[in-house]
Image: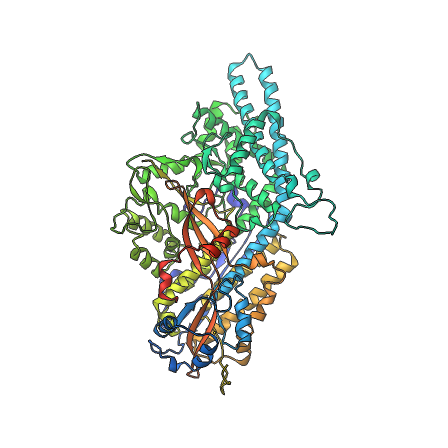
Amino acid sequence: MDPIIKFSSVFLMLLLFVFFAGCSGQETEQDTPGYAADVLKTEAVTYSGILGQGAFLTGNYSLEALDVELKAPSYELPLEKDKISNYAAFSGRIPLNESALKMLESNGLVVIENPYNPAEEDITSMYVTLKKEEIPVFITTDSLLHLYHIQFDETLRQIEEKEFYDTLWETDLALLNSSVEEYNNSSNNASNNASNNASNSASGDEKEAARRNTAYFAVALSLLQPKPSQIQTAEDPYGFVDEALFPAGSAEKYQFEVPSFVKEEVESELALIEAHGGFAPSPIFRYEEDYSQYVPRGHYTRSEKLQNYFRAFMWHGRMSMLLKDGLIKSEDPAKDARIQIIQASLISSKLENEPELLKNWDRIYGVTAFYVGFSDDMGPYEYIEAMDSVFGNEEREFNETTVEELKTILAENQGPQIYGGTGNCVLEPPFTPKQADECLENTTGFRFMGQRFIPDSYMFSNLVGAYTGEYQGEKDAPFTLVISGAERPIRGFPRGLDAMALLGSGRAVYWLDELDDSNYENYSVRYSELDSEFSNFSAADWNRNLYWSWLYSLQPLLKDYGEGYPTFMQTDAWQDKELSTSLASWAELRHDTILYAKQSYTTVGTAMLIPPEEKPFVGYVEPVPDFYARLLALTKMTNQGLDEMEVLDPTSKARITYLETILSRLQAISEKELENEELTAEDYDFIKNFGDQLDGVIADVDEKARKTTVVADVHTDGNTRAVLEEGVGYVDMIVVAYKLPDGRILVGAGPVMSYYEFKQPMSDRLTDEKWREMLEENPPEKPEWVSTYTS
């Protein structure tokens, strides 16, 4: 089975909303490398499917066919400013310094600091100002990607606050009570079977498993439960309501008590989570856990309820009940592993026997899987299937023999593909890929709501540490280099460039080589294996959920633009700008999914007014119709899927539907531009008034949600105790020279995102708020490749 697609046969039947039970059509650009000369042609792609058991939704992915002659008018580079019809008018409003003008003349484009507001965080505001200043508008893909991010992030946030918090509380509370009951019953059984040593031993393990499950769910409920400081006071003299707080009365609604027999362990776990210092032994699970992961980040800092939900869901997503004892540090690791198998079995049995609880679990898992994908680890369905095999219809007795049988059957499931830091695995010399594989295998087990398999983390896991070997270059310190605990120079950090290269960016490959970030002993071998795997994916593979489809939408931006495209698009500078756009969008994707996406780890190796012209100065749309087509298909899939799951409120649906209308119009205009067809007056009005058009897409969206300044940590290096941060900064301005069918060359301007990649101590993982402080006070350096297009 393809390691990217991981789930059991039972679970496959449960969650078939990869949408692809029936399919027709194929896409030329996907199945045939490159594009036909001077033609952009793709076939329609249509997939539809219906969810089976559980019936969450029916879903469709539909990508329109394209057949566009590439004959956009060109000009020669370097471009003299005297040949730009509106340069005098433009420069009177937006002056370009010598460096920026030289870059514009050399490449037909330049990115400059936003002259209206260098610290602008709203990407839509520039369009309004450009219209007011009578400057031709250049509509960028950056703005469309950011607008999609807003829809993705806001819909997910609303679902979590309005539905999932309460569903998780209800489920955890029921499972806590069930665990307490199982613990008490096991105690009684032990007393009644005191004379039977074998039965007493089995009962002892099951009793301890029930006790630890009690502690496990008590931690989750403690993290969910609102503290007094998080609750709105019942009476405010001015009637003020702070929506960031829990509503008055929440203390009474969310009540529970930690059972006395697990109080010490629960308090110890909560103290570690509160300190979020990094790796430490888990009092309940007895292996090392990275407690720095429990700092609420992303949109989860926007309310107290979201902060609590984040911590509890992170607990459910990360803590594993292991199959093997290789990472457990206790007096009897084998016994602890056996108990953890029983723990997972007891939880799965309870879900199987309580349809409402299983429905709750299915609801949360199904909706989040539509956004992000399937878990990288086993969950209840795999354990239910295994128990059915071992016990059949007989009573389930967890003794050493039956637990070993369960372990054997469970081990037949594919293990995790991403090392997520469980156990803080340490490799001893000689640091081979086989050792890293064994470390990953030792993390196999049950996660109640496991973090999800995402392709970029999978890439990163295979392009660091023992998999890539030692550094072979002569540069002192390429970005990816770390010195392991064994004093060996290894690839401790991946780069966003790795993911973009594997998505098809030739410029990303160039920069990895140029910066010596690919100069490791086995990097080329590992990269080739991944490239072979990902290049064989079909459109179905790439559109299995919203996360993957977002990445698929970026791919047209990363290709080489040849003959027939506008002159500025045929330059390395444009390629690098599109690379940064894609990276910034990817950073937003990781920000939005930080709670659910499984993060990769590197294992530790020990050791600026002119009278108007006769012809108006008109704007331009970045002409990438294949990008708009894919983003439109993704937006429609988002709209339909969420609507059918009944989690999309009318306001959100109206915003997404309006975004569909805009994307469809941009696709049609960009096709005309590439075919050198004169746009209509209505088309030019649409471009000029683009800022006004966006009102329908951001209606009722909170100011915080519109900001581009977001950050996400995406990888952890255990050797340096540091994380890889991917950030989006302030909105910059791109100035582009484009040629019209009437022969005039004009310059227009539009907003673009800025991208950052840097390292940060794992004990200080950044929130959006801390990132904004850093941008204001001491921003990190921008990546090297921005020098080809910025001034």
Q: Nearer the viewer, residue 732 or 597?
A: 732
Question: Residue 558 at what x, y percent from top left?
Answer: 39, 62
Q: Quadrant of residue 353?
A: top right
Q: Looking at the picture, does residue 54 appear above or below residue 692?
A: above
Q: Quadrant of residue 484?
A: top left
Residue located at (39% from left, 76% from top): 71
Colouring convention used in this rendered image of the protein: rainbow
Instruction: Tell me the quarter of the image containing the N terminus.
Output: top left
Question: Residue 757 at what x, y percent from top left?
Answer: 41, 54
Relative side of 362 to 549, left or right: right
Relative side of 456 to 202, left or right: left
Residue located at (56% from left, 59% from top): 706
Question: Residue 492 at what x, y percent from top left?
Answer: 35, 45
Q: Is residue 455 visible?
A: no
Which residue occupies the extreme bottom position in the image? 614
Residue located at (52% from left, 23% from top): 205
Relative side of 120 to 174, left or right: left
